[in-house]
Amino acid sequence: MTEKKAQLRVDGIAEPLDLPVYAGSTGPDVVDVRGLTAKGIFTFDPGFMSTASCESKITYIDGDAGVLLYRGYPIEQLAEKSDYLECCYLLLNGELPTPQQKAEFVNAIRYHTMVHEQIHHFFNGFPRNAHPMAIMVGVVGALSAFYHDSLNIDNEEHRKVAALRLIAKMPTLAAMCYKYSIGQPFMYPRNDLDFSANFLYMMFGTPCETYQPSPVLTDAMDKIFLLHADHEQNASTSTVRLAGSTGANPYACISSGITALWGPAHGGANEAVLKMLNEIGDESNIDKFIKKAKDKDDPFRLMGFGHRVYKNFDPRAKVMRETCQNVLAELGKENDPLLKIAIKLEKIALEDNYFIERNLYPNVDFYSGIILKAIGIPVNLFTVIFATGRTPGWVAHWHEMISNPFKIGRPRQLYTGATQRDYPG
């Protein structure tokens, strides 16, 4: 991290203030404003859109160029040549594993896939129709009650064990949420299956018959997990880091990330896509809804198009589009009414000048929502799938922060309330 200089002139302060300017390995320079507090000045940045809250080596995004890198590797290359668990290793350790390291990591994940039997009883305290994210927030946070052997955040081995447990157990808990909601028995993990096939087995298998996940669906699930594994300093990752800065245990920190992800402005985007398709209802209504979307005075918005970060295209969407086509062909669901609406919307967005000029391309949430719907995963579980995929990113950022000197997060404010006054009487 190289250092430059900037000067800030403030009315009422005689001398200009010298501020260090740092250049990272890539991306925009950042101005270090930490010295301003000594002068009684804070910066004002609602939403932290212009603030680098930390230094990190994990993930880089260039929204204008449509670039997403995990530890320097383009997401398109990883989606083509790697798999989810290898990306988990990469995010956690900084380098791709050797074949032996990969085998050892996969075996370590398999060792931790089961959850404590007592956790099964946690589910009985929830209504059958409870939102799966409500259950995940509670159950993941409660994992800390079962693993007192690895809660010392100053111990690197404890941090590594916690990371393995979280990555391994999230799909088990996600599948348990689904099984509980439909009244079917929980399915224990099968460690002869790979990560994504095991998840589908726990979701759709029953004790009554043998369930063998389709390779096409397994590959699609693996890509969904991989493409969602990390996305830099987003709301949920920042929440994990903020919670971690207090010294909270990793399970509580990841639970806080799940809570942030639950917000419809963050993790609920692919769920919103399916709700939109249901609202449109039929192909014959598409033109009417396209007209509504183009009307700036109409509150209706097409969900799953464009992206707050990516200004030209979402690199993950290119991968998901091909995967989506493979899944629909495998399942023979090209004629599903909602999926037919989605396919026609996609065609319009890619050809209509209104969408092209505004960069309203189908994004990763659009395609992942269609894939999950086709596989048979209920809409209210979509964000849980997102949380499962994002876990290694959350854990990697938490581990990176705890492994280096850090300060407790303490944002300041621009106070506009009443000044000091005396109590009447």
Image: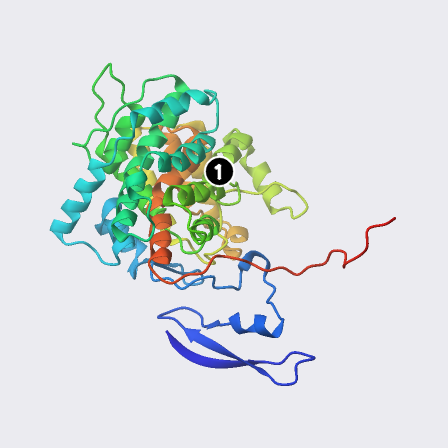
Whether residue 377 is visible: yes
Residue found at the very far right of the displayed protein: 425
Nearer the observer, 186 or 369: 186
Residue found at the very far left of the displayed protein: 100
x and y percentages locating residue 375 in the rendered image: 34, 30
Q: Is residue 245 left or right of residue 12?
A: left
x and y percentages locating residue 57 in the rendered image: 34, 62
Which amino acid does the dot numbered 1 rest on? Val
Name the colour scheme.
Answer: rainbow
Q: How many marks?
A: 1
Residue found at the very far bottom of the displayed protein: 15
What residue is drawn where x is 44% and y is 28%?
Answer: 337
Residue 172, quarter of picture: top left
Residue 233, quarter of picture: bottom left
The vertical placement of 314 against 193, above or below, is below
The vertical placement of 151 against 183, above or below, is below
Residue 136, quarter of picture: top left
Kind of element beneath mark 1: helix
x and y percentages locating residue 199 in the rendered image: 28, 32
Q: Is residue 287 left or right of residue 97?
A: right
What residue sits right under mark 1 in the picture? 273
Image quarter (top left, top right, bottom left or bottom right) of the N terminus: bottom left
Residue found at the very far front of the displayed protein: 425
Nearer the observer, 140 or 178: 140
Whether residue 339 is visible: no
Q: Is residue 283 left or right of residue 42?
A: left
The vertical placement of 281 against 49, above or below, is above
What residue is drawn where x is 41% and y is 68%?
Answer: 27
x and y percentages locating residue 115 in the rendered image: 29, 30
Nearer the observer, 173 or 78: 173
The vertical placement of 279 against 121, above or below, is below
